[in-house]
Amino acid sequence: MGGSGGGFFSSGGSSEPTCAELRFRTTIINPNLDILQNVNIDDILDIELISDEIPAVITKTKSGDVVGSITPSEIARLLECLSKNNTYTATVVDIDSPRCEILVKHAFS
C-alpha cells in the first residue's frame, strides 16, 4: 500500500486526543548542560520539529538555544500534529540536573 503518510500515526480511534488536546509530561533527553543551567522551573520552552532524514523534536529557550530533544511515548501523535503546523510549548516542571521534566501542551490551549 502506497501513500505519503511519512510514517506518522494516522488518526483513527476515538480515544486519541485532538492536536489541541494533546498534553503530556516527559523528560528532555541529552540536555545541553550549559543551557540547562540557565533554565528554571516554570520557564516556557518552544517545541520544534526538525526534519532531516529522521524527524526529531527539540526544545528551545525563547532566545533560541537548544536545551535538548524529547521522545515521549506520544511521539507519533506529536509528530503528526507538528507536521500539520500546530504549535506546542513546554513548561519546565522539575529540574534535577541533568534531568529536566517538562509538560508539553498545545500553545493555544
Image (cartoon, helix red, strand yellow):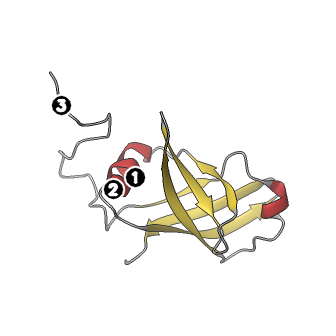
- Near mark 2 (Cα within 10 A), the count class, few <14, some 14-19 or many ≥20, is many
Q: At label 3, which amino acid type do we have?
A: Gly
Mark sitting earlier along the chain (1/3): 3
Q: Decide: marks 1, 2 in contact (CB < 8 A)?
A: yes
Mark sitting earlier along the chain (2/3): 3
Quadrant in which the C terminus is drawn: bottom left
Residue 45 appears left or right of 54: right
Q: Which mark is residue 78?
A: 1
Task: Measure how far apart labels 1 and 2 are at the Cα level.
Answer: 5 Å
Residue 29, image x, y percentages: 67, 46
Quadrant in which the N terminus is drawn: top left
Residue 27 appears left or right of 38: left
- Near mark 1 (Cα within 10 A), the count class, few <14, some 14-19 or many ≥20, is many
Q: Name the residue carrying label 2.
A: 81
Residue 15, image x, y percentages: 24, 52
Camera-side residue of 60 and 24: 60
Q: At label 1, which amino acid type do we have?
A: Leu
Asked if residue 70 is positioned above or below residue 23 in the image, the reply reads above
Asked if residue 27 is positioned above or below residue 6 in the image, the reply reads below
Camera-side residue of 63 and 21: 63
Q: At label 2, which amino acid type do we have?
A: Cys
Q: Nearer the viewer, mark 2 or mark 3?
A: 3
Secondary element at image label 2: helix
Task: Measure how far apart labels 2 and 3 are at the Cα level.
Answer: 18 Å
